[in-house]
Image (spheres, helix red, strand yellow):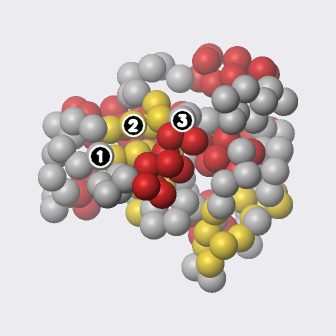
Amino acid sequence: MLQACGQSTDRAYVLMLEGLYQKTVPTIDPLELRTTLTFDAVKPLLIDTRQQEEYEVSHLKGARFMDYETFNMDALQEVPKDTPIVVYCSVGYRSERVGELLKAAGFTKVRNLYGGLFEWVNRGYAVHNSQGRTNKVHAYSKTWGVWLQKGEKVYGKE
């Protein structure tokens, strides 16, 4: 694992993300997001774009669930277009697609969490479920789960 600038991402993961991302939505580094959530007066709207069962296992504290497959812009009618929004999923692919939709709808401050929830957890940052803080993370599949280095991997419904 690389340990530069607080990053725990290994080189293979970085290369995989480089191939996966289309760079259509600016990213935000997990450390920057964590700092923003801790210190900034204006907190971004966090949108978890994974499936319901993934969200229920764990998510970022305060994140709003909006499934990638059934994403509906109508659920954000009350949100001003200049609201800072951070979208995320397991590694950042699904959330980048949702970020594109948000930008196309006129949202001006949309960012995609770099490396997704996996990178967040790999850096040792907290995730939560309906009972509070948890160590469990839905790893999506055995194939994608190899990128999750920390936390207790969960596959399927809990």
Residue at image position (64%, 47%) is 120
Q: Amino acid at mark 1?
A: Pro
Whether residue 75 appears in this view of the structure is yes
Specify the amino acid type for callout 2.
Answer: Arg
Q: Would you name the residue on which mark 2 appears?
A: 111
Residue under label 1: 84
Disc 1 crowd, CA 10 A, few/some/many (<14, 14-19, 20+): some
The residue where tag 3 is placed is 29
Whichever of callouts 2 and 3 sits on the residue coming sooner in the sequence is 3
* For marks 3 and 1 on the same chain, the one whose residue lies earlier in the sequence: 3
Q: CA distance from mark 2 to mark 3?
A: 10 Å
Residue at 70% across, 33% down: 7
Q: Nearer the viewer, residue 5 or 128?
A: 5
Q: For numbered disc 1, what is the local secondary structure?
A: loop
Q: Answer with left or right where residue 2 lies relative to residue 25.
A: right
Inter-mark Cα distance, 1 to 2: 8 Å
Examine the image and state in which quarter residue 145 appears. top right
**Is any atom of residue 10 visible in this view?**
no
- Residue 157: percent from the left, percent from the top? 71, 68
Q: Is residue 48 above or below residue 94?
A: below
**Vertical arrangement, residue 50 with respect to residue 103, above or below:** below
Separation of disc 3 and disc 1 at Cα?
A: 15 Å
Q: Is residue 38 above or below residue 120?
A: below
The three-letter code of the residue at mark 3 reads Asp
Q: Determine whether, in the image, residue 1 is placed left or right of residue 68.
A: right
Tag 2 secondary structure: strand
Image quarter of residue 37? bottom left
